[in-house]
Image (cartoon, grey):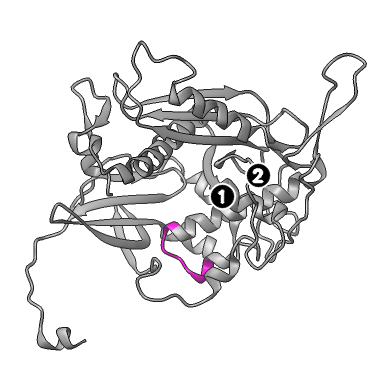
């Protein structure tokens, strides 16, 4: 929401930063580049994967959260350390078929590159190079078979906001899961793993007759791919519930090292979302949470939620049933970009929605009781 006034469309239809977006305080420039760079980069990555797998649904999950279940260092607050790793994992899935997983790195910058800017000095090129290093430290099954998307967003490119992308091929497949039972994603209390990181990947010799090499990495062995698929699906389910303002319902999908305790405890008012809002769009009731922001004095409500039917399935721990139902409904959600009594509305194939609207201006005084409180 804080970047709504920092973006505008050119006559060509391409997005660019407004005058306000181009002149933030120096201390906020890096934050703006990072947050907007990730947002646009992830959008491009999701579209690229969807074009490759048009019949599948897309789940985007924070890579750190997923990897904590298998690689976290012991401690009161488990961590992955400073080891290089992707930013996100995108899973392209459909019930009854192997999923394909992509490692994603995303960055943004505010460099004004000119014709005289050399390649070594180009921020986007340096970010793609660092992204390559991070992606090389994640492997599913065999070495060099996990597809990657490396993205760098130039916010001040001459053509408007420009996303540079590199793609490496690969299958990155996860085994098919049963619809129920111990091998499904419905299993509660999924066990953690302690998968080795040091010298985890065997590399072929650099030259014929040379010695075999080893590479440190977050490498999921073939024997653990089924478990990793369960973790990935359950972490994605928890993220969807959190998007809709859920609290304790999220805890069932996380391991201790992933932060289950955070969602099991009571939270203070104002410190987390609350699942207490519902709205109807078309014939579907969506449940979730809402927040009110101020943009230049204008009060704007933002609602984030998901179909009540799908929410109830995830709240009950039925991940596989949710996926089957979400896949069956994937083409039934509204396709409009606005809704009655609302402004912009975004519906996704997984049954989630985000909607914005301007609230009526209300000027209310502060009572004596309120002042005393």
**In the image, residue 164 above or below residue 72:** above
User: In this view of the protein, can residue 251 be seen by the observer?
Assistant: yes
Q: Name the residue under label 2.
A: 83
**Counting other residues with Cα less than 10 Å from the Cα at mark 1, is it few (<14), some (14-19), or many (20 or more)?**
many
Determine the image quadrant of residue 16.
top left
Relative to 160, say whether 91 is above or below.
below
Residue at 62% over, 31% down: 133
Disc sitting over residue 323 in the figure: 1
Q: Residue 308 in magenta?
A: no
Q: In which quarter of the view is residue 131 placed?
A: top right
- Residue at (57%, 67%) from the top-left corner? 251
Residue depicted at x 56% and y 23%: 167
The mark tally for this picture is 2
**Badge number at residue 190:** none
Q: Do the residues labelled 1 and 2 touch (CB within 8 Å)?
A: no
Q: Residues within 10 Å of mark 2 (few under 14, many from 20)?
A: few
Q: Locate residue 121 relative to residue 270 in the image: left or right.
A: right
Q: Residue 135: x percent and y percent?
A: 62, 34
Residue 328 locus on image (x, y percent) = 51, 45
x then y, percent, for residue 170:
67, 26
| Magenta-colored span | 243-249
Q: How far apart are marks 1 and 2 (CA)?
A: 33 Å
Q: In which quarter of the image is the C terminus?
A: bottom left
What residue appears at the point 11 percent right and 60 percent down from the top-left corner?
360
Mark 1 or mark 2, which has the lower sequence index? 2
Q: What element carries label 2?
A: loop
Q: Outermost residue toward the top?
A: 115
**In the rendered image of this protein, does residue 277 appear above or below residue 64?**
below
Helix, strand or loop for disc 1: helix
């Amino acid at each position: 929401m804080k970047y709504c006034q920092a973006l505008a469309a050119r006559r060509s239809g391409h997005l660019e930063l407004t005058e306000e977006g181009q002149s933030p305080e120096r201390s906020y420039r890096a934050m703006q580049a990072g947050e907007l760079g990730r947002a646009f980069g992830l959008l491009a990555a999701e579209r690229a994967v969807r074009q490759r797998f048009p019949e599948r649904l897309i789940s985007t999950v924070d890579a750190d959260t997923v990897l904590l279940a298998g690689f976290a260092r012991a401690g009161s607050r488990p961590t992955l350390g400073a080891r290089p790793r992707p930013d996100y994992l995108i899973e392209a899935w459909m019930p009854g078929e192997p999923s394909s997983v992509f490692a994603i790195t995303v960055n943004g910058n505010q460099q004004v590159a000119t014709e005289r800017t050399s390649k070594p000095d180009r921020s986007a090129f340096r970010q793609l190079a660092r992204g390559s290093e991070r992606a090389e430290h994640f492997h599913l099954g065999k070495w060099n078979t996990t597809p990657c998307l490396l993205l760098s967003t130039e916010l001040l490119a001459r053509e408007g906001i420009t996303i540079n992308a590199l793609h490496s091929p690969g299958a990155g497949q996860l085994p098919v899961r049963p619809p129920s039972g111990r091998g499904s994603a419905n299993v509660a209390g999924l066990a953690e793993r302690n998968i080795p990181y040091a010298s985890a990947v065997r590399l072929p010799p650099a030259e014929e007759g040379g010695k075999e090499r080893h590479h440190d990495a977050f490498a999921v062995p073939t024997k653990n791919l089924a478990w990793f698929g369960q973790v990935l699906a359950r972490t994605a389910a928890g993220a969807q519930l959190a998007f809709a303002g859920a609290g304790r319902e999220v805890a069932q999908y996380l391991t201790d090292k992933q932060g289950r305790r955070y969602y099991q405890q009571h939270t203070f008012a104002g410190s987390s979302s609350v699942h207490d809002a519902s709205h109807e769009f078309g014939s579907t009731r969506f449940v979730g949470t809402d927040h009110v922001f101020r943009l230049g004095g204008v009060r704007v409500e933002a609602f984030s939620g998901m179909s009540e039917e799908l929410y109830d399935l995830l709240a009950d721990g039925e991940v596989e049933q949710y996926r089957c139902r979400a896949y069956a409904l994937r083409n039934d959600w509204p396709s409009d970009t606005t809704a009655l009594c609302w402004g912009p509305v975004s519906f996704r194939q997984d049954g989630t929605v985000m909607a914005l609207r301007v609230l009526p201006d209300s000027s209310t005084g502060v009572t004596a009781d309120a002042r005393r409180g």
